[in-house]
Amino acid sequence: MLAALLTGSLAAGAFALGFGGCTELVDGRVTVELVYPCRPGPGELGPRMSLFCLSVVQNGTLVSGPSCASSLPDARLELPESLAPLQVQVEILDGSRVLLLRGTSPPVSLVSGEDLAVPVALAPAQEFGLLWAAEAGCQELPHPLEGHTATLFPTGHLLLAGSARAEVTTGRAALLLDTHSPDAAPLVTPASLHRHQHQASLLNDGQLLLTGGLTALDGAPTLELVSLPPGSELMGAYVPGLDYAGAVQLEALQTALIHGRPRPHAAVFFGSQVLLTDGESPPEMLLDGGARTALAEFPGLPGAPFPPNGRTATVVPYAAGKALVPGLGTGRLARLTVQEGAASVLFESVLEGMAPRDQPWALLLPGGSIMVLGGLVGAAIDEPSVVVLDTAGGLTPVAVPAGFPERGFSATLLDGGRVLVAGGVAPGEGQASARTFLLQPAGADAWRVSRGPDLRLARALHTATWLPGGRLLIIGGTALGAGADPARSVEALSVELP
């Protein structure tokens, strides 16, 4: 019976995975290369690393291991031949059996007779670690990122588009970051992509639409739509060594927005059409991957129910063609029903008397409810910064501690329905913060909020991305005078799995 044999090699900083039969004759090998953060790096962590554990997961489910030993060469696993695709997970613990580092490889298939090299990028579990930064032992990102977008593709690449910083080279205003290796490559872009506070929408066919925002050089709204066409190699399996940056072709579309939208919000419906709102102009719908644009129509209403008050509403799809809009206008919860393939949208008011909000974060939780965070504007209504809404209009307040941010933060949905809030600016403060908070479900209609590890750099207007395997990446932003500039930095945390 053919089986796979997983072994380790500490001296090489990697371990090998090979096929073997009853005689353990190896006719194929997968070498997994450990990729450490630059701070704390292997030199700082080495004296603390005591136990090395190897596991194999498939579709997020543990299928073999963990096998733990005091050195990588002594950690071994035997695997059935039929596992494909699989991912190898590495965990490194200290002498007290506290997790120091965790990483997961991209999905790979074991093919008899083939030699593969697969990276495993490690992230600290007790503190944030720097991957790129202006610190000893690190390198900076090729250009600064602030007010950018971050789109994760199935290969594990992040496309980081735009920036508010003037020093970005117009015509190369995007980066492709490989989350499996220390590689961040500048991309050739249309000149209009040197913008910020725009939106990025990934459609079902792999097309990426970049819409709205302000051009960095003159601060004017841009009408130009930029697209990554469908069918790019970023939608396939991860291939080590492939020049993904050379395969990414961002292009300006012939169609344009009807209105300039300085701070738009984009919501994707049916995987192929995008509703844009911005609090200044009537909403519009992008159809057929941006090939058609049309002002949204609201049957039965005298006009668009999105008032031009400068407050950008957040539209949260929760089912096919259905979305909630929290804190709309002067403060109400609305429901939208979108017609597939058309610009027609039915509007109904669900809850009156909510506090008005401007561009709040809103996350669709696993149970179907929606968490709304921040964005509160001055009003007589006393409403907490964080609330949870159900689709029928029920509202549950979430108590948050002092120092919880009100703007410029990121809120990321993690496994198990948890939410991690990072950075931003707290009420009464004028500088960016390094604080993080973890919000965890604690029974029916209850949430527990606790402090997480501080970021290494205070930042606002950054992006946060949750990666399969349990890593959180925080990228770019501004310190607003709080300390070192974070715009060329990336930091990562391995979040404990539920």
Image (spheres, rainbow, N blue to C red):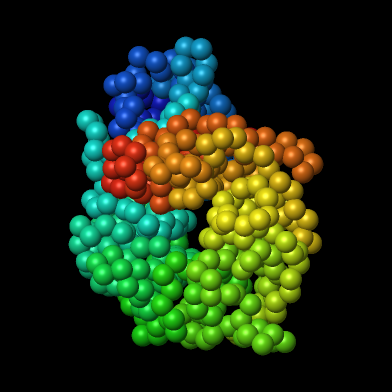
**Residue 63, image x, y percentages:** 61, 36
Q: Residue furthest front?
A: 380
Q: Does residue 57 appear to the left or right of 264 in the view shown? A: right
Q: Residue furthest top?
A: 95
Residue, x 66% and y 80% (percent of image)?
345
In the image, residue 464 sits, relative to residue 282, either above or below, namely above
How many tags in the picture? 0
In the image, residue 215 sits, relative to residue 493, either above or below, namely below
Viewport quadrant of the N terminus: top right
**Residue 445, image x, y percentages:** 77, 43
Residue, x 41% and y 56% (percent of image)?
150
Residue, x 52% and y 32% (percent of image)?
452
Question: Which one is nearer the viewer's eye here, 365 or 33?
Answer: 365
In the image, residue 283 sits, relative to residue 453, either above or below, namely below
**Residue 110, image x, y percentages:** 47, 44
Q: Does residue 50 appear to the left or right of 61 in the view shown? A: left
**Residue 431, image x, y percentages:** 39, 42
Question: Which one is nearer the viewer's eye here, 51 or 357?
Answer: 357
Q: Does residue 84 appear to the left or right of 249 in the view shown? A: right
User: Can you see residue 1?
Assistant: no
Viewport quadrant of the C terminus: top right
User: Can you see residue 349?
Assistant: yes
The quarter holding residue 450 reads top right
Residue, x 68% and y 43% (percent of image)?
398
Question: Which one is nearer the viewer's eye here, 428 or 41?
Answer: 428
Question: Which one is nearer the viewer's eye here, 437 or 191?
Answer: 437
